[in-house]
């Protein structure tokens, strides 16, 4: 029993990341009809927004501390971040400690700007070209983005720890009346799950309850008619591209304490998130979210020792296997709409 | 000649000449000169050129003719490598059975994967092949370790059985060293150096064999492109539905095409194992599949020679361009005043050396955006422009060469 709950919990945080990336991919596909292979790179850029912010916050000057001496007896030089000067030492330290959550605010405008620039600068010219060309050009863009990051940040993983308050684990077993220590779960993963849920809810609410979202949904259903009604649908779709980029970026920002970012983390997630989108059904937003969580939980169940002993290697391939089975038996995916990308 | 039209035969002759003269052509700079690091005429790299050429030719048969974009082709290359490796271990150190078996096994695997993947087309086909390839990669790196050697990979060993008789390359070697892959006693690494003046040219048996195989592969690909079968594949690309309405079942054609393409990849994998007897799973990773896509597109998808050019270009970049370092750059720009030199070096530096992938990505994007027909179309446009027939002729040329849709 505790094993099952533990695996579901493990699946939830991975599933949240899959769901967020797949949600962004589907937003782009559903609105613009573009298969965006650079979406993993956007996730990676989001993660590096965190790295950048924590570096900016950490910018410091050398101050000679008269009260202490180093081992040679000279006055000790201490690095004091500039932020201490502005906000005082305790507040400054807290800000640096909370760099990851603060990056959310920092990354939203950046990611929206990147997304809009990408759409206006490049993707716009590819609407009329075949899907294969769209895949290829965004694949090229992904390589370029990741190499730029590699040039500036190096090839190594850069840790970005969670705030001190969230370090450590939550004793989930004790909370639901089981033996203490039976199910231990890191705090940050709980935070990630709730963050993902809030973000997903926000995107859905935005599409469902605002006029802007209504127009976008209408455009997704029939772009031409909405255009004929005198609405500048292209501009709204551009903004949706920016929002999708921001969703991917935020998924990356919050993922940094779980996996330290490196320049190819996007590519690692990209393949799986495409599988997620296809399993959920091309162009279906609820499908993408559902498939993200289903596949995440499936993956963590497949990594249980009992399952691996029974079917060795299943944990490595279960996602792809599920995708193949679903694609062959339910060509539209779990919640796919009729008439979207049916060959 | 050889059942080819004159134009195609000339193309084959040109490719043959390039391949034969490669050891000379790729070493244009005298040994010991400052530019010698741009010489690409060493056996290891030349073998890579032709092996990846074969891989890209095979990929182009699938993508160029039918427009089905497979993102999992490296899996067949890897399967071919493993199969070839096992033949070198079990049968004999002779490369011929290894190459034949690697083609057969890759053909069988591609038959199975193709049978399933080809039920869908478009983006779904790409994702299905990608999923299969990632499965193959993950399994090869983990559970299939007894067969694939897992993360350490697979090598030839001293005490491999090699059951074929000695004159076919079986048995163990006389001198107690691990035997090297050979062709009836001629080792693949056997190399002769010819020096003419300051130039040093390297002739290598492994390269010779790869080159012969590649020419045969190229010839077969020309025959496929010009055959009724090839025409059928092009018809599938331009409108598969319409073809079905005429009462034709396109599946067998697609499957045959996919298997042929997979066998080309297997052949390339087998040759790789024969040239350098060690195989690792990373050969099957999806980035490797992406690489062959890059090669084909850069060179010119759907053209005969394009994939070979693309493969050569990317491998040249990977091995030579990536070696340029800051010191070399400073030497190049030493004519400029110091402040200008600093600026120039800092502008160019991100694009060379370890950053060659950036250049590759930018080049790739530029080709997709401006030159959908790749280098071949570029060459054609320049040719037309030189002949002063820009305008109508160039437009017609571009129409004909519009790549995969």
Image (tube, coloured by chain):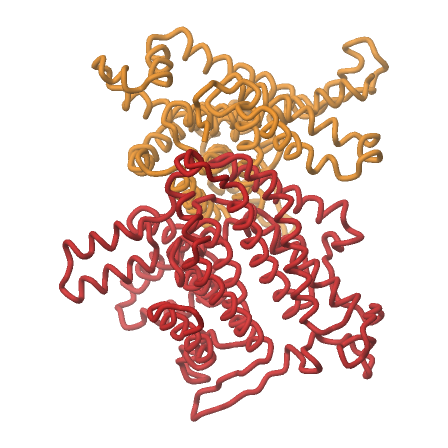
* Outermost front residue: B247
Give the number of callouts.
0
- The answer, for residue A52, to whether it is visible in the render is no
Position of A205 relative to B74 (above/below): above
The structure residue drawn at horizontal position 49% and vertical position 36%, both measured from the top left corner, is B121
- The answer, for residue A42, to whether it is visible in the render is yes
Position of B104 relative to A96 (above/below): below
Closer to the camera in the image, B238 or B94: B238
| Chain identifier for the red-coloured part of the image | B
Position of B287 relative to B167 (above/below): above
Q: Is A264 positioned to the left or the right of A15 in the image?
A: left
Q: Where is residue B46 in the image (x, y as percent from the top left)?
A: 51, 72
Q: Where is residue B119 in the image (x, y as percent from the top left)?
A: 55, 35
Closer to the camera in the image, B329 or B192: B192
Q: Is B350 positioned to the left or the right of B115 in the image?
A: left
**Quarter in which the N terminus of chain B is drawn:** bottom left
* Outermost bottom residue: B197
**Quarter in which the C terminus of chain B is drawn:** top left
The structure residue drawn at horizontal position 34% and vertical position 55%, both measured from the top left corner, is B374
Q: Is B166 positioned to the left or the right of B96 in the image?
A: right
* Outermost top residue: A209
Q: Position of residue B350 (x, y in %)?
A: 40, 55
Q: Quadrant of residue A206?
A: top left
Q: Where is residue A29 in the image (x, y as percent from the top left)?
A: 42, 27
Look at chain A in the picture and name its colour. orange
């Amino acid at each position: 029993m505790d094993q099952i709950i533990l695996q579901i919990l493990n699946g939830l945080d991975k599933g949240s990341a899959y769901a967020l990336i797949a949600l962004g991919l589907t937003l782009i596909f559903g609105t613009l009809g573009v298969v965006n292979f650079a979406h993993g790179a956007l996730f990676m850029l989001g993660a590096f927004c965190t790295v950048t912010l924590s570096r900016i916050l950490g910018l410091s000057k050398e101050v000679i501390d008269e009260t202490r001496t180093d081992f040679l007896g000279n006055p000790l030089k201490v690095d004091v971040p500039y932020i201490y000067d502005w906000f005082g030492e305790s507040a400054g330290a807290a800000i640096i400690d909370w760099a990851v959550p603060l990056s959310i605010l920092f990354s939203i405008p950046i990611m929206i700007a990147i997304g809009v620039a990408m759409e206006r600068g490049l993707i716009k010219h590819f609407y009329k070209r075949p899907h294969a060309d769209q895949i290829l050009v965004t694949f090229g863009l992904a390589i370029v983005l990741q190499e730029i990051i590699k040039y500036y940040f190096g090839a190594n993983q850069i840790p970005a720890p969670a705030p001190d308050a969230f370090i450590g684990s939550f004793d989930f077993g004790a909370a639901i009346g089981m033996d203490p220590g039976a199910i231990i779960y890191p705090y940050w993963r709980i935070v990630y799950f709730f963050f993902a849920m809030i973000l997903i809810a926000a995107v859905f609410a935005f599409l469902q309850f605002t006029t802007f979202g209504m127009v976008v949904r209408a455009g997704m259903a029939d772009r031409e008619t909405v255009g004929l009604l005198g609405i500048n649908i292209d501009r709204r779709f551009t903004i949706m591209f920016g929002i999708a980029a921001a969703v991917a970026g935020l998924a990356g920002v919050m993922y940094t304490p779980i996996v330290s970012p490196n320049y190819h983390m996007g590519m690692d997630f990209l393949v799986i998130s495409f599988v997620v989108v296809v399993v959920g059904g091309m162009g279906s937003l609820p499908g993408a979210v559902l498939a993200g969580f289903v596949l995440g939980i499936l993956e963590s169940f497949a990594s249980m020792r009992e399952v691996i002993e029974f079917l060795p290697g299943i944990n490595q391939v279960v996602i792809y296997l599920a995708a193949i089975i679903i694609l062959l038996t339910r060509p539209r995916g779990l919640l796919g709409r009729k008439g979207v990308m049916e060959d | 000649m050889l059942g080819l039209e004159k134009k195609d035969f000339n193309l084959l002759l040109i490719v043959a000449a390039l391949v034969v003269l490669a050891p000379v052509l790729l070493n244009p700079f005298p040994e010991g000169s400052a530019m010698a690091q741009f010489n690409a005429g060493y056996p290891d790299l030349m073998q890579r050129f032709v092996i990846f050429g074969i891989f890209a030719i095979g990929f182009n048969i699938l993508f160029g003719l039918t427009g089905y974009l497979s993102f999992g082709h490296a899996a067949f290359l890897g399967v071919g490598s493993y199969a070839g490796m096992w033949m070198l271990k079990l049968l004999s150190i002779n490369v011929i059975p290894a190459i034949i078996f690697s083609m057969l096994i890759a053909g069988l695997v591609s038959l199975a994967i193709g049978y399933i993947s080809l039920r869908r087309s478009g983006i779904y086909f790409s994702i299905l092949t990608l999923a299969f390839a990632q499965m193959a990669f993950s399994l090869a790196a983990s559970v299939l370790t007894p067969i694939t050697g897992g993360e350490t990979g697979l090598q030839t060993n001293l005490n491999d059985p090699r059951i074929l008789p000695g004159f076919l390359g079986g048995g163990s070697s006389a001198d107690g060293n691990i035997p090297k892959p050979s062709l009836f006693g001629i080792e693949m690494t056997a190399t002769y150096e010819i020096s003419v003046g300051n130039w040093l040219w390297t002739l290598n048996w492994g390269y010779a064999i790869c080159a012969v195989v590649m020419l045969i592969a190229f010839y077969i690909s020309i025959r496929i492109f010009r055959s009724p079968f090839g025409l059928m594949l092009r018809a599938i690309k331009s409108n598969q539905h319409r073809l079905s309405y005429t009462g034709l079942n396109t599946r067998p054609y697609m499957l045959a095409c996919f298997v042929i393409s997979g066998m080309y990849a297997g052949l390339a994998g087998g040759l790789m194992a024969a040239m350098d007897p060690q195989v690792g799973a990373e050969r099957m990773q999806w980035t490797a599949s992406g690489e062959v896509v890059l090669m084909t597109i850069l060179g010119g998808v759907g053209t005969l020679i394009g994939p070979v050019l693309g493969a050569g270009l990317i491998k040249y970049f990977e091995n030579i361009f990536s070696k340029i370092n800051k010191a070399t750059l400073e030497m190049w720009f030493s004519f400029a005043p110091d402040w200008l030199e600093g600026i120039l070096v800092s502008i160019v530096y991100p694009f060379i050396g370890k950053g060659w992938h950036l250049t590759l990505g930018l080049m790739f994007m530029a080709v997709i955006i401006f030159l959908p027909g790749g280098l071949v179309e570029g060459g054609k446009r320049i040719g037309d422009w030189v002949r002063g027939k820009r305008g109508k002729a160039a437009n017609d040329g571009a129409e004909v060469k519009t790549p995969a849709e």
